[in-house]
Amino acid sequence: MNFDHPVVSSLLPVVFLILIGFVAGRAKLVRQDAVRDLSNMVFLVLAQALLFRTMSSVHLEKLDMRPVFQYFWVAGSLFFVMLMLYGRDSRASVLALASIFSNTLMIGVPLIGLAYGEAGQVLLFTLISLHALVLLTMATIVLELQMAHEQAAQNGETRHMLKTVGMAMKNAVLHPVPMPILIGLIYAQTGWGLHPIIDKPLQLLGASFGPVALVLVGITLSQTPIGVHFKGALKLSVVKTFVHPLLMAAAGYAMGMRGLHLAVMVVAAALPIGANVFLFSQRYQKEEDVVTAAVAVSTAFALVSVTLVMALLPLLPA
């Protein structure tokens, strides 16, 4: 094996850090009670510093939104296809979301940074800034409307549609992932920059995000039961890590996307199911066990799908 190959050199650190977390979890070096606190630190401290600092120097006129819009066109289309296949009920909304929602933050950020550098990360952060906002809002609105319909069918109670849509959009905008990106972008437009006294701590916190997040993924996987839910998890994982990136590659290429833009969008589509889907399923108490198992299975599958994507994309004709 050529360890200097860009695919290998980008993926192996990710695999090793997840493996270290898995072993630490199995060995009970990190108690299950501590996982939630560690997760809060990753999402609410380290990620905030990384996202804000990176976007605080990005000017809006330099952002290319076309790849991001194409990504959401593919993801949204796949969401509604899966919604139909799973039965068009509130349970189906959770499973359809799992089919398209990538772990762009905990796995995507360190992987894209290693493989494509800061230019790739800026493009990924542009996607991340809208990822939860668009996909969680879409799934929440669909699920809330379905639950309102199911509730009305059971007891005759109805919920105002505009109120349902408004609450879904509010929850998505106030999500801790889009907020620091949007604030960073707004701050960047002032042209003030960051004083070293502020910039250095943010840099150190941001640099800690990648390794700590990947170790946390491993710890979480070590405590994830799969068992009887493997068949359902397998179906979701195949769609998420193979069908989604295949559709993204085909649609992106057909729409004229090439180079770094195509690579980052397709790699993002090939990533495993994101933790937000697990939180989403818990919040609505729909398919929690299947989604939890699918997060674990899709993470294993993504090692293959991401490797294939990163190896094959450079072979496409320009």
Image (cartoon, grey):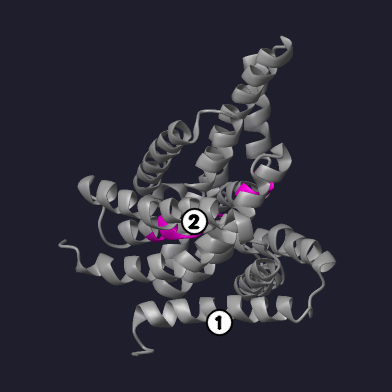
Position of the C terminus, as image quadrant, is bottom left
Label 1 Cα neighbours within 10 Å, binned few <14 / some 14-19 / many ≥20: some
The residue lying at 60 percent from left, 71 percent from top is 210
Disc 2 secondary structure class: helix
Q: Which residue is mark 2?
A: 234
Give SS at disc 1.
Answer: helix
- Inspect the image, locate mark 2, and give the three-letter code of the amino acid beneath it: Leu
Furthest-left residue in this view? 317
Residue type, mark 1 in image: Phe
Task: Point out the image quarter for the N terminus.
Answer: bottom left
Residue lying farthest top? 156
- Residue 16 is marked as 1
Residue 282 x %, y %: 71, 45
Residue 116 on image: x %, y %: 40, 70
Q: Is residue 212 left or right of residue 119?
A: right
- Which segment did they paint magenta? 267-280
Magenta stretch: dominant secondary structure: helix
Where is residue 158? Give x, y as percent.
Answer: 70, 12
Residue 107 visible to an observer of this rendering: yes
